[in-house]
Amino acid sequence: MDDRAPDPHRRSPREIVRGLARTPTLGLPYAFGFVDRLTAGFFALVGVFYFQETFGIGPAETGIVLGLFFAPFALLQYPMGVLSDRIGRTIPIVIGSICYGGAIVLVGTVPTLELAQASMVLVGVLGALVAPATMALVTDLAGDDERGLAMAGFNIAGSLGFLTGFLLGVPSRARTATSPPSSSSAASRC
């Protein structure tokens, strides 16, 4: 196994910005990573309360519902990565992202816990379709000597997305916690 580190010189974090300037198309997978993790951050905070308040379940059941996303998301990374290598990056990223967004909306609009659980599985499957293709696109677009740097930029965008999702969830959660219950769907309360 060869170590691909071609440059023994130390690079600064500014190199990520310079790399994005040299290869602006990296902005596309960075944006997808940001939005993908934004939804994860939002679900991490608001999802817990949403499932408990909407469907009257406890903490253990809530953990199981959230696990219905994480299990397929984790277990399908490898096969979806193989699929991305076989058919390319565009179809999994574009079609997967559109369907992922629809599945997220579905989670917030279904009337029963069982349908919410099925929707969470669907979100996990679609997230697994998009994630490896997006990361592979980063390495496809980056130069051979900038792959690590490009992946660092992708992870920074994703981490900022997670933080943003969490921060968006705080006022959303505060608003629903102080408002009286209504018959409107939970999606409109979040």
Image (cartoon, rainbow, N blue to C red):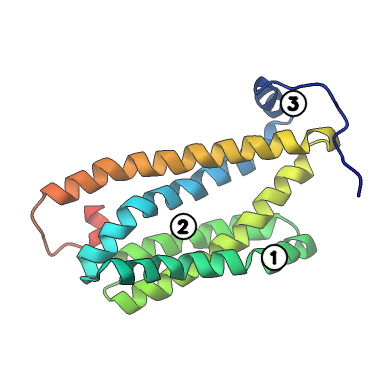
Counting every numbered tag in the picture gives: 3
* Residue where numbered disc 3 is placed: 22
How busy is the neighbourhood of tag 2: few (under 14 within 10 Å), some, or many (20 plus)? some
Q: Quadrant of residue 55?
A: bottom left
Identity of the residue furthest to the left in this view: 180
Q: Is residue 136 above or below residue 87?
A: above
Quadrant in the rendering for residue 127 = bottom right
Q: Give the Cα distance between marks 2 and 3.
A: 30 Å
Residue 72, position in %: x, y? 55, 70
User: Given the image, on which type of amino acid does mark 2 rest?
Assistant: Gly
The part of the image, by quadrant, that contains residue 116 is bottom left
Q: CA distance from mark 2 to mark 1?
A: 22 Å
Place of residue 113 in the rendered image (x, y in percent of width and height, measured from the top left): 30, 75
Q: Is residue 125 left or right of residue 173?
A: right
Q: Nearer the viewer, mark 2 or mark 1?
A: 1
Residue at the spot 42% in from the left edge and 48% down from the top edge: 41
In the picture, measured across the screen, residue 50 lies left or right of residue 63, that is: left
Which residue extends farthest right?
A: 2
25 over 77 or under it: above or below:
above
Hey, what amino acid is under mark 3?
Arg
Q: Is residue 85 left or right of residue 133?
A: right
Q: Which mark is residue 101?
A: 2
Is the residue 117 above or below the residue 188 in the image? below
User: Which residue is drawn at the image coordinates 72% and 51% (left, top)?
Assistant: 136
Q: Which mark is residue 96?
A: none
Foreground: disc 1 or disc 3: 1
Name the residue carrying label 1.
Answer: 78
Relative horizontal placement of residue 152, taking residue 161 as reference (left or right): right
Report if residue 144 is visible in the image.
yes
Separation of marks 1 and 3 at Cα, in angstroms: 30 Å
The answer to whether residue 125 shows anywhere in this view is no
Question: First in sequence: mark 1 or mark 3?
Answer: 3
